[in-house]
Image (cartoon, rainbow, N blue to C red):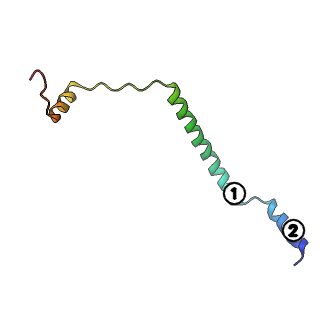
Amino acid sequence: MDGEDFAGKAAAEAKGLNPGLIVLLVVGGPLLVFLIANYVLYVYAQKNLPPRKKKPVSKKKLKREKLKQGVPVPGE
C-alpha cells in the first residue's frame, strides 16, 4: 500500500459532501429553527400576555353540579 494513494483517496472523498449530511441539514435545520422559535414565543407569551379569562358557568350547569354533590339548590 502506498501512502500517497491513500491520501489521494481521502482528499477525493472529502471534496464531495455526503448526501446523508445534506438531507440531515435540509430537514434538521428548519425543524430545529421551528422548535426554538416556538419555545421563544411560548416564553414571551407566558411573560407578556394576560391570563385567559375563565368562561362564565351557566346557572344550569351550577345547578346540575350541586345536584351531583347532593347539595340542595336554594329556591327549590
- Amino acid type at circle 1 is Leu
Question: Circle 1 — which element?
Answer: helix
- Amino acid type at circle 2 is Ala
* Identity of the residue drawn at 55% across and 33% down: 41
Q: Nearer the viewer, residue 23 or 58?
A: 58
Which x, y percent locates residue 72? 12, 28
Q: Quadrant of residue 52?
A: top left
Identify residue for label 1: 21
Query: On the rendered image, what quadrant is the C terminus found in?
Result: top left
Identify residue for label 2: 7
- Answer above or below: position of 63 versus 16: above
* Identity of the residue drawn at 66% across and 55% down: 23
Question: Circle 2 — which element?
Answer: helix
* Identity of the residue drawn at 17% across and 28% down: 63
Which x, y percent locates residue 5? 88, 72
Q: Nearer the viewer, residue 68 or 59?
A: 68
Does the residue at mark 1 contact the one at mark 2 (Cβ under 8 Å)? no
Left or right? Give the position of 36 relative to 16. left
Q: Residues within 10 Å of mark 1 (few under 14, many from 20)?
A: few
